[in-house]
Amino acid sequence: MADHQKEPLIIATMAIMREIPKSFSNGLTTQNLGKPDYDLIKEQQRSAISAFSQLGVKTLLLPADEKNPDSQFPRDTVFSYNGVMFNLNPGSPRRNKEVQINTSDIRSAGFQVETVKYGDSAFIEGGDILAFDSQHLVIVGMSGRYQDVRTNKAGVDVLANVLRSIDPDVTVIAVPHKGQNGQPYGVLHLETGMTPLTWQQALCDPQCHVEWERAYYPLQNSERLILPPWHVNTLTRDAGYAAHVLPINGGVMIAKGYPTVKQLADASYSTVIEVDMSEARKMDGSMRCWTILHNEK
């Protein structure tokens, strides 16, 4: 990874998002932070769209889907790698309809989405996928929440074969994640609990324990990377939510209100944009959850 340290971690030209449905407070959540405010989350999403614009990313905003309250988080349903979009298969059964709707709406907007067939027991959600196209590297988290499997080994196997068809040089690493100190409860998705801030450093929620020693390589190419690929900086419990940062096109978006993360971001980037995520957090969401990041060719 050292050869590419001056390149942005993520390069994207478009963020596909969906308007917040008024029914969004009926969505899935593991949090106990009170009922989210509709007007406020709409304002916060607009701030995120403005932040993307400042970083050179245009937004495709799909209309609100009132029948599916989790639809504000399309990332779990469609994924983009190396300029190719394809459907995923969420582990939560109630989100299956979102896959069909998002795929259809993106196609209606003039973009191609490849159809991938998954078995009945193969689950993969976009919130568990950290992809670095320029590095030919994809790291996938296998769900660690007790009896709440969002991504599993069978889903990783399907994903790996799809990625290899797009990029023959790709390395796919799957790592289990769970709660700290052996507790079964951790974060919902890998991206919510651990994301890289730079090529050298990742931020981690103390509730997220990534079991690098149990890494699984579905394409059997384990020789090219030392794990973990970053220095992992574990945040304090009260700052854990801010572990989800979005370094994109040479700048970085971070959650507002976390001074430690702001200081770390300022030390590495000239463009640091804070986005208030208070209402999305109540629904287990982050700025990454709001987007399908796509790099048009």
Image (spheres, rainbow, N blue to C red):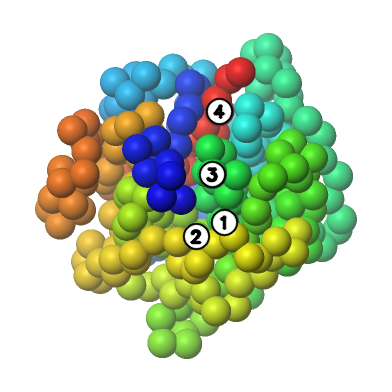
Structural distance between the alpha carbons of marks 2 and 4: 20 Å
Identity, as a three-letter code, of the amino acid under mark 3: Gln
According to the image, label 2 marks what residue? 190
Q: Which mark is residue 201?
A: none
Q: Can residue 172 be seen in the rendering of this structure?
A: yes
Q: Which residue is mark 1?
A: 139
Q: Is residue 193 above or below residue 246?
A: below
Mark 3 is surrounded, within 10 Å at the Cα level, by few (under 14), some (14 to 19) or many (20 or more) other residues, namely some
For disc 2, the neighbor class at 10 Å (few under 14, some 14 to 19, many from 20) is many
Helix, strand or loop at label 3? It is helix
> Do the numbered discs 4 and 3 sit on residues whose CB atoms are within 8 Å?
no
Three-letter residue code for mark 2: Leu
* Label number found at residue 135: 3
Q: Nearer the viewer, mark 1 or mark 2?
A: 1
Report how far apart the C-alphas of labels 3 and 1 lie in the structure. Answer: 11 Å
Residue at disc 4, secondary structure = strand
Q: Is residue 75 visible?
A: no
Q: Secondary structure at mark 2?
A: helix
Give the amino acid type for the residue marked by disc 1 in the picture: Ile
Query: Reading the chain from its start, which is encountered first: label 4 or label 1?
Result: 1
Per the rendering, the mark at residue 294 is: 4
Pick whichever, 271 or 169, lies toward us. Answer: 169
159 on left or right of 47 = right
Q: Quadrant of residue 165?
A: top right
